Image: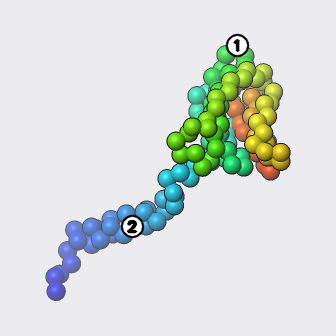
Amino acid sequence: MFPLSRNSVKIAAAGALVALAAFATPVSAYEMVQKSGPVGANEPILVTVGQKHVIAFFVPGNGQCDVQAVIGNADDVEATSAIRIRVNLNPAQTALIDSSATETLTLKCGDYAESLSATTSDQQLVSR
């Protein structure tokens, strides 16, 4: 038997934390983190609507939200189905992206074009 020193107890505790962190990671590297905002300029919105992944951000310009979004199939790991859209929204104006006949993503430009938020058809709209 080896006597436990303070260093070996610290190493064992660190190893236990690493093991716990490994179990806390997503099951698949393809699971997308969800972030619906509101977000500031150049910050990403990351959402899944039905079978589509959407990544969107905006840049303020001329009192508007200049929004860019990339939309692709959730099961398309090589992003061959991805498309890009661009739209200019006035403050409080919205743009709708339909994923299917029943699922819609709403992007909304915040007051004074300072934020962008996203909601799916089953969420309430949050805005700044």
Up-down: is 112 above or below 4? Answer: above
Q: Quadrant of residue 112?
A: top right
Amino acid at dot 2: Ala
Residue 108 x, y percent position in the rendering: 76, 32
Residue designated by label 1: 62
Q: CA distance from mark 2 to mark 1?
A: 50 Å
Give the SS element for disc 2. helix
Judge the density around disc 1: few (<14), some (14-19), many (≥20) Cα neighbours within 10 Å: few
Picture layout, residue 74 above or below residue 24? above
Q: Residue at x 60, y 49 (%)?
A: 75
Q: Is residue 50 visible?
A: yes
Secondary structure type for disc 1: loop
Q: Residue at x 49, y 53 (%)?
A: 29
Q: Residue furthest bottom?
A: 1
Between 34 and 37, which is closer to the camera in this rendering? 34
Say which amino acid is labelled 1.
Answer: Asn
Q: Does 125 sit left or right of 1 as displayed? A: right
**Residue of label 2:** 19
Q: What residue sits 72% from the left and 16% below the top?
A: 63
Q: Earlier in the sequence, mark 2 or mark 1?
A: 2
